Image (cartoon, rainbow, N blue to C red):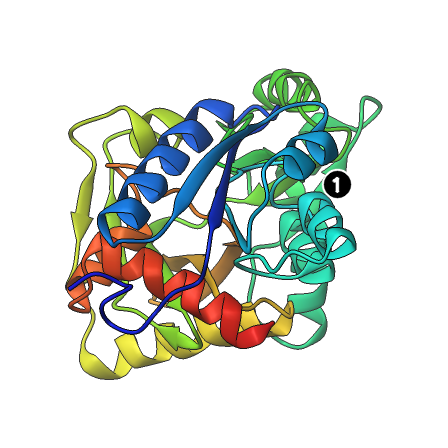
Amino acid sequence: MSAASAGFNPGRVGVLYGGTSAEREISLQTGAAVLDALRQSGVDAVGIDIGADTIAQLQATPMDVAFIALHGPGGEDGRIQGVLEYMGIPYTGSDVSASALAMDKLRSKQLWAGIGLSTPEFAVVNADSDWDQVLKNLGGDAIVKPAHEGSSIGMARVQSGAELAQAYRDAAHYDGSVLVERLITGSEYTVAILDGEALPPIKLETDHRFYDYDAKYLADDTRYLCPCGLDAEREQGLKALALQAFNSLGCRGWGRVDVMADHLGNFYLLEVNTVPGMTSHSLVPMAAQAAGLSFAELVVRIVRACQTES
C-alpha cells in the first residue's frame, strides 16, 4: 500500500543529501535510497544535492517537508536545521539544539557523566599534550576521534604514545577538537530509535581493530546480529539506556545510539547519531526490518513523525 493510499500525504518532500562534509559519499547513498523509497510509496519527492549556496537551492525548490539525509558537519550539527526553521520548512529528525549537542561528542559525554549515565573515560588533547601520560591515564589502550565527525572518520585505535601523536594529527585534519577515549574491550551494540521507541538492538562483530569506516561501509565480512544475543532483561536494559541517552540530549524523531559492553557486561554510551546512514550496510533499516518495517515504511514513518511534531 502506498503512503498516499494509506491516507498519508505529506505534500512535496525535498530530500537533502550530499553536502560538503567528509561524509558526502555516504550521504549521497543515503539520499538516493530515501528518495527511491518515498517515490515507491507514492510520495512526491525531489532530491537536492546541497552545495555551498544552500539557501538559494532551497528557495529554488519549493517543498512542504525536508527529509534531512546529510551526514556530518552542516547536516547533523544544527546548521541546516536552523536554515529550515528560518525558512518555515518542517524537517525530519532532531531540532537545532539537540542536533548540535549530539554532534559534539565532548558535550554529549559531559552531559551523560553529569546525569549519571556511563560513558568511557576520556581526555581532550592538543598538539602540546603529553602523549604517554594521556595514554597511561586511560589504561594504555584508547580510541582517538574527532569531536564533530561521524562514520568513524578520523578515528584510530592507539596503544603507544607515538601512535597517539600520529592519530591526533590525523584526527585534527578533520576537527579542531580531538578526544581520546578509553577502549572498552567487549561487545558493541547499536540501538535505533524511531518515534519514541527503541527498535531491536543489533550486535556488531568485525575482524578489524575496531568498527571503523571500512567495517561500516566497505567490508563484506562485518557481522550484524539481530537478535543481538542478550537475554530479555539485559536487552530491555540496553534499550532503556539508549532511549535515556537519546532523550537526555533533546533528540526527537529518529536516530541511533551506539553502545559498548565490557567483559563484565556493563554498558557504556559512545554517541548518538541524529541522521544515521540509510545505505545497504546501514543499521537503522536492519533494526526496522527486525521490528517488521520495510525500508519504505521506515522512511514514511520518519516523515510522518516530523509532521506530527511540527
**Could you say which is closer to the camera, residue 5 or residue 199?**
5
The image quarter containing residue 97 is: bottom right
Q: Nearer the viewer, residue 72 or 92?
A: 92
Q: Residues within 10 Å of mark 1 (few under 14, many from 20)?
A: some
Q: Residue at x 73, y 44 (%)?
A: 79
Tell me if 135 is positioned left or right of 213 in this view: right
In the figure, 193 relative to 296: above or below?
A: below
Task: Where is residue 248? Give x, y as percent.
Answer: 62, 73
**In front of the other: 246 or 253:** 253
Measured from the top left, where is residue 254 in percent x and y? 45, 63
- Image location (x, y in percent) of residue 207: 23, 31
Pick the quarter of the image with the N terminus.
Answer: bottom left
* Residue matched to label 1: 124
For the residue marked with disc 1, what is the amino acid? Val
> In the rendered image, which quarter is residue 134 located in?
top right
Q: Nearer the viewer, residue 126 or 65?
A: 65
Q: Is residue 41 visible?
A: yes
Up-down relation of residue 228 to residue 161 (above or below)? below
241 relative position to 42: left or right: right
Q: Quadrant of the C terminus?
A: bottom right
Q: Decide if residue 75 is on the left or right side of residue 243.
A: right
Q: Is residue 125 left or right of residue 223?
A: right
Query: In the image, residue 255 lies at what x, y percent?
Result: 46, 59
Q: Residue furthest bottom?
A: 233
* Residue that extends furthest to the right in the rendered view of this protein: 128
- The residue at 26%/37% (across/down) is 281
Number of marks = 1
Q: Is residue 278 above or below residue 250?
A: above
Instruction: Tell me, yes or no, if residue 263 can be seen here.
Output: no
Mark 1, secondary structure of its residue: strand
